[in-house]
Image: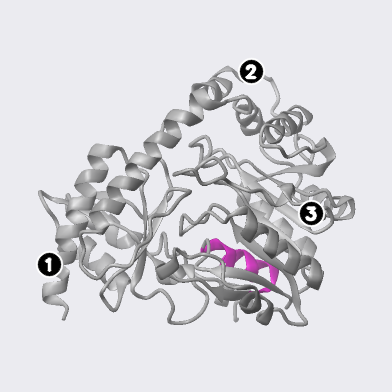
Amino acid sequence: MQLSKRAREIQASPIRKLMPHAVAAKKRGTKVYHLNIGQPDIPTPQAMIDVYHSFSDKVLAYGPSQGLDVYREGLVKYYQKYDIPLKEDQIIVTIAGSEAVTFAMYVTCEVDDEIIVPEPFYTNYNGFATMAGINIKPVLTVAEDGFQLPKDEVIEAAIGPKTRAIMICNPGNPTGTVYSKEDITRLCKIAKKHNLFVISDEVYREFTYDGAKHTSILQIEGMEDLAIMVDSVSKRYSACGARIGCIVSRNAELMAATLKFAQARLCPPTVDQLAANACVDLGDEFFGPLISEYKKRRDLVFAELQKIPGIVCVKPQGAFYIVAKLPIENAEDFVIWLLDNFQIDNETVMAAPAEGFYSTPGQGRNELRLAYILNEEDLTKAMHIFRQGFEEYKKTHK
């Protein structure tokens, strides 16, 4: 018996596929600093934790497929703070941002259709596309200019008869790139010209630095029928295990179709929605110190990377990731070597090889992603190990 085509072709996560090497290191008694995965160490807001502790319903029943009314009402208030006016029926709560992306693919594409995505991109887009039976059409961005969007003619050259949408992540995972309002506007002009949907993954909305401003796809006039936003509470509230997201659009026909997909999976988790709703009113008192902390971590990692001769790395302005282009042939081999062969005081570090964030074969082989999600003390140790390990690796891998 042969497995399905999607089972044979779905990509292993580059973020997680090297975990056996980390597990083996830990079994040898080595401490591993995980910079490979976007799991923040920032405490989840107490208001969220309190909801879990206080939930007392006698029956944990099914909820509405579109999400609890109280939470969608809360989301309307949340987005209004960012100058994104919405109605409740323009929001469907999903099982994390992952389901929101998958739903967006389902409602915009037929099997074998294409979605254009600037690469490198969040690696699971590949997996979601395989599950949906569609194809990612990459347009290359490069480390040398901080992974900014390519010129209009490059994007338009990728549009073909099967293209149905353009998808972006802003601020970007894995790059930390923040697209300007001008870039989002010109992307929308291309979409309108070719009648394409724009799917905008905005889960890192709050995480911008150095005066950079986030522009939502829903803030661009004239995109009412073409704009789809996906979102999640995972990183915003340091609540990756809550698995609550949403898909948002002002296109009534699209949302009606999406609701049918939501009905097919019954409902999103009830208690997690209530917990997320407890955070919708959090403001500067929460996000101000949070952004300052991440900026400090970013600056630390970036400063350490700049000490490596020959590195290519533009300081990112958003999210909590840095992609570095290293003067070596194979970043994955380096990450494996760190886990298998290098320790300082019985400690080592793990990063995510960036090749898995590309769909074009051969791209990103000498790049890796670092997630600055550890406290300053641990991050300082991790980056010291990283730099010393890199110097040693270069000596033994000419």
Residue type (three-letter) at the residue carrying disc 3? Phe
Q: Is residue 219 visible?
A: yes
Q: Say left or right for 17 vs 300.
A: right
Disc 3 target residue: 261
In percent of width and height, residue 68 lies at: 75, 32
User: Is disc 3 placed on a helix, strand or loop?
Assistant: helix
* SS for callout 2: loop
Report the span colored magenta: 123-136
Residue 121: percent from left, percent from top: 53, 64
Question: Magenta stretch containing residue 64, yes or no?
Answer: no
Quarter residue 112 falls in? bottom right
Q: Earlier in the sequence, mark 3 or mark 2?
A: 2
Residue contact between numbered discs 1 and 2, judged by CB atoms under 8 Å: no
Quarter of the rendering occupied by the N terminus: bottom right
- Frontmost of labels 3 and 1 is 1
Q: In percent of the image, x 69 and y 28: which residue is there?
A: 60
- Name the amino acid, label 2: Ser
Residue 44 visible, this angle: no
Please identify the quadrant where the C terminus is shown: bottom left
Residue on which disc 2 sits: 56
Residue occupying image coordinates x 35% and y 63%: 313
Mark 3 or 1, nearer chain start: 3
Q: Residues within 10 Å of mark 3 (few under 14, many from 20)?
A: some
The image shows a total of numbered marks equal to: 3
Query: Residue most toward the right?
Result: 253
Q: Nearer the viewer, residue 337 or 153?
A: 153
Is 227 displayed left or right of 5 in the figure?
right
Badge 2 local density, few (<14 within 10 Å), some, or many (20+)? few
Please give the residue where the numbered disc 1 appears in the rendered image: 392
